[in-house]
Image (cartoon, rainbow, N blue to C red):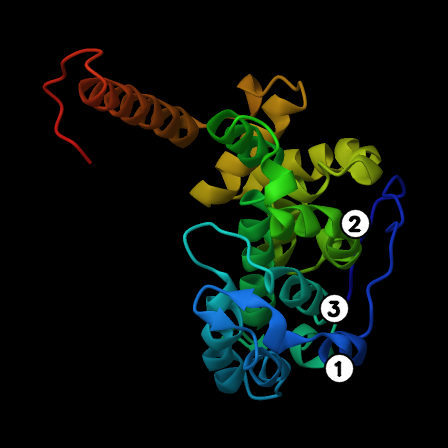
Amino acid sequence: MSHSSSQNEQPPPVALPSLHALLDSTNWGALATACGTGEELPAALTLLTDPDPVIRESALQAALGPVTHQNSIYEATVPVALFVASILNHPAITAGDDSTDEGTQHHPTLVQLLDWLGDTAYDADDECVATGERVFDRGFLDDYEAMRAFRDARPEIFSAVHPLLGHNDAAVRHSALVTAIPLIEHPLLAQHQANLADHARRLLATSTDRRHRDRALDALRVWGHDTRELKNASDTTAHEHYARLKAARASWDGNWTGGGHSDDPPF
């Protein structure tokens, strides 16, 4: 597999533990999940590296589902995330699946693992913490040890995601970028922002994926970049749609607090 990388990309700051160390040294049965404990997770996680893509696909829900529920971070989320990050360069994952197009491969397992890491990182990003601080009147992370542990693990996770920013499969590198965006909120990773901004611009020049474009545009705006020239007609339409939904939601919420009246239906 060939990878491209720009000279200004920074080396990853932290190394991940080995797969065997993660599986053998973690007391899975003592870690909470959405539906109990993580006692069954090691067997499911091991199947994620099976050579058979059908087995890998069926293992995804068993391995990730117990720590993926209602945008929450559980005690078992961190070791699962570290395991997932550790297998991103596993031969069974990097080999990909043969495509109907001669000489090409797709990497559905790799993309799904990256997407899960990214979604989990967004569930623990600075915006989520700020919301928690407002709702719970400070001390949010003091009482949410699982989220704090995930946020502390972001450099290790980024060390595995970082090389995939130059992957030869556009689906992989775009998912890697979207995953990396919330990870670099960690102070040790701030120096990667300029490089990710370059990747975001390249994504916006080629991708039509709505979710990817939204994430890239949002990141660039937060980082202080002018995005007007990077938007297309679809972005403008989506922005207007989101604004209408936000206004309708605010109006509906106002009804519950006695703050106003809206003819818009609830949703």
Work out whether residue 126 or residue 98 is closer to the camera in this orientation and state it: 126
Going by the picture, which residue comes out furthest to the top?
260
Residue 113, compared with residue 246, is above or below; it is below
Front: mark 1 or 2: 1
Residue 127, compared with residue 212, is above or below; it is above
Work out whether residue 197 or residue 57 is closer to the camera in this orientation and state it: 57
Which label's residue is closer to the chain start, 2 or 3?
3
Tell me what residue is drawn at x 82 percent, y 74 percent: 18
Coordinates of residue 166 in the picture (x, y in percent): 74, 53
Disc 3 residue crowd, few under 14, some 14–19, many 20+, Cα 10 Å: many
Numbered-mark total: 3
- Residue under numbered circle 2: 155
- Residue under numbered circle 3: 86
Give how far apart the Cα atoms at labels 1 and 3 are.
14 Å
Placement of the C terminus among the 4 image quadrants: top left
Disc sitting over residue 120 in the figure? none
Coordinates of residue 249 in the picture (x, y in percent): 27, 25
- Residue under numbered circle 1: 24
Is 7 on the left or on the right of 237, as rendered? Answer: right
Name the amino acid type tagged 1: Asp
Residue 208 seen from this side: no
Name the amino acid type tagged 3: Ser
Dividing the picture into quadrants, the one containing residue 26 is bottom right
Give how far apart the Cα atoms at labels 2 and 3 are.
13 Å
